């Protein structure tokens, strides 16, 4: 059977879709930031994602997925790191440093995600993937670098705010790798849970800091942007984690700053600059290196039991279990994988987490 090639794996399109929605929402979030405090905006964006996805799931009649105790621990750890600790650290850093500097430091999330995935969680990578990751991150750094940076006393910032932003990136990187452990679960449910957790945390921080809710128009705008740029984007990112692993999904998502800059040029009449063009070339190089990756070798699958959406007849060669009566199409249920040894191109997805 001819397996689907890595280049057209659905996770690639999901990662680009996630980056597109998040990047496109950045200019809108920037405009909204002038209307309310950062804490309030963060809370409304996340709540918009959580509530919007919750309503979407209600309309679909979606049921709550069943997680075993191990999976639930990974999800709780992801929610704590990405929805609780990281936003607090980011707001602390933003309160005492220029936003442009914080934007530059936030690009560390992709690097830390990849390093944790490679070193701690043992995702496979080679020189081609590492070079592509470096090119994409270099483009994001170039795009974020302040063009009219203040000098002298104005440029001096405390070490602690910068460290807080970097720690926020570290906890979001942990969040990405933890979420990968449960990425086979319904992506909209995961994004809904994380959105509600992060939204509640940031909204409470905003109220403690003395902020008040904006008027209905601004509140609706913030939650609407949050639904698409945070909720749908996060659900797509979970799908990308499912198919690509944390480091590759993070690399594709790192194109989001370029999407945001492009939308700023097209719709906010911002000028086309040489950093934008140079970043486009670097990111294009990195994406090409990733898209043309070919990782294939003989590998052994151990016994595995889990639950996720899959199709019959099997599109990937890993779901050939029988049903009585016979079933064709997509469905989700708990199923077992018998030991198997074969060779084909693959990513470090949920079925290919073997050592190298």
Image: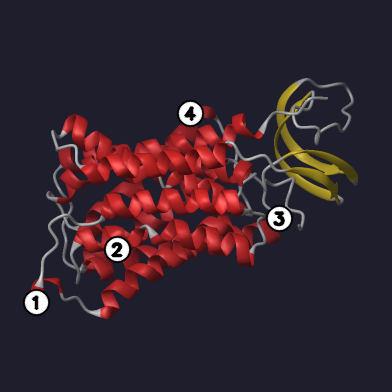
Q: Earlier in the sequence, mark 4 or mark 2?
A: 4
Q: Nearer the viewer, residue 108 or 92?
A: 108
Q: Earlier in the sequence, mark 3 or mark 2?
A: 3
Residue depicted at 83% across the width and 39% down the height: 343
Q: Position of residue 37 (x, y in %)?
A: 17, 57
Distance CA(mark 3)–CA(mark 2)? 31 Å
Q: Nearer the viewer, residue 37 or 338?
A: 338
Q: Is residue 232 left or right of residue 261?
A: right
Distance CA(mark 2)–CA(mark 1)? 34 Å
Whether tag 4 and tag 3 are in contact, CB under 8 A, the answer is no
Residue depicted at 55% across the width and 42% down the height: 290
Q: Nearer the viewer, residue 285 or 220?
A: 285
Residue depicted at 45% across the width and 33% down the height: 56
Q: Is residue 293 left or right of residue 207?
A: right
Distance CA(mark 4)–CA(mark 1)? 55 Å
Distance CA(mark 4)–CA(mark 3)? 26 Å
Q: Name above or below for residue 45 compared with residue 265.
A: below
Query: What SS does tag 3 mark?
Result: loop
Q: Nearer the viewer, mark 4 or mark 3?
A: 3
Residue receiving disc 4: 59
The N terminus appears in which quarter of the rendering? top right
Residue receiving disc 3: 68
Within-10-Å neighbours for mark 1: few <14, some 14–19, many 20+? few
Query: What SS does tag 1 mark?
Result: helix
Residue receiving disc 2: 204
Residue receiving disc 1: 153
Q: Earlier in the sequence, mark 4 or mark 1?
A: 4
Residue depicted at 17% across the width and 50% down the height: 33
Distance CA(mark 4)–CA(mark 2)? 29 Å
Q: Which of the 4 image quarters holds residue 217?
A: top left
Q: Earlier in the sequence, mark 2 or mark 1?
A: 1
């Amino acid at each position: 059977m001819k397996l689907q090639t890595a280049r057209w794996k659905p996770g690639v399109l999901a990662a680009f879709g996630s980056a597109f929605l998040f990047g496109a929402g950045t200019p809108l979030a920037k405009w909204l930031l002038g209307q309310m405090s950062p804490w309030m905006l963060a809370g409304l964006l996340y709540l918009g994602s959580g509530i919007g996805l919750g309503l979407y799931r209600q309309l679909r009649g979606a049921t709550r997925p069943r997680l075993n105790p191990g999976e639930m621990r990974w999800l709780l750890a992801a929610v704590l790191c990405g929805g609780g600790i990281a936003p607090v650290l980011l707001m602390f850093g933003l309160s005492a440093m220029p936003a442009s500097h914080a934007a530059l430091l936030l690009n560390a999330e992709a690097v830390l995600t990849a390093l944790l995935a490679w070193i701690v969680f043992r995702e496979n990578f080679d020189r081609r993937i590492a070079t592509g990751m470096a090119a994409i991150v270099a483009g994001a750094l170039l795009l974020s670098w302040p063009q009219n940076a203040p000098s002298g006393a104005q440029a001096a910032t405390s070490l602690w705010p910068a460290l807080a932003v970097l720690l926020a990136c570290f906890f979001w990187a942990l969040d990405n790798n933890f979420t990968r452990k449960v990425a086979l679960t319904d992506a909209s449910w995961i994004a809904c849970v994380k959105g509600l957790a992060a939204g509640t945390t940031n909204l409470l921080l905003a109220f403690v800091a003395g902020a008040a809710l904006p008027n209905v128009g601004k509140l609706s705008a913030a939650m609407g942007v949050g639904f698409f740029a945070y909720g749908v984007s996060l659900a797509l990112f979970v799908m990308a984690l499912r198919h690509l692993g944390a480091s590759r999904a993070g690399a594709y998502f790192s194109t989001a700053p370029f999407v945001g800059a492009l939308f700023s040029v097209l719709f906010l009449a911002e000028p086309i600059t040489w950093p934008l063009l140079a970043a486009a070339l670097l990111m294009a190089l990195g994406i090409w290196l990733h898209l043309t990756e070919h990782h294939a070798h003989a590998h052994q699958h151990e016994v595995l039991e889990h639950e996720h959406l899959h199709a019959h007849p099997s599109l990937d060669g890993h779901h050939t279990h029988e049903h009585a009566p016979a079933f064709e199409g997509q469905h989700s249920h708990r199923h077992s994988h018998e030991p198997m040894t074969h060779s084909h191109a693959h990513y470090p997805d949920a079925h290919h987490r073997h050592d190298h």
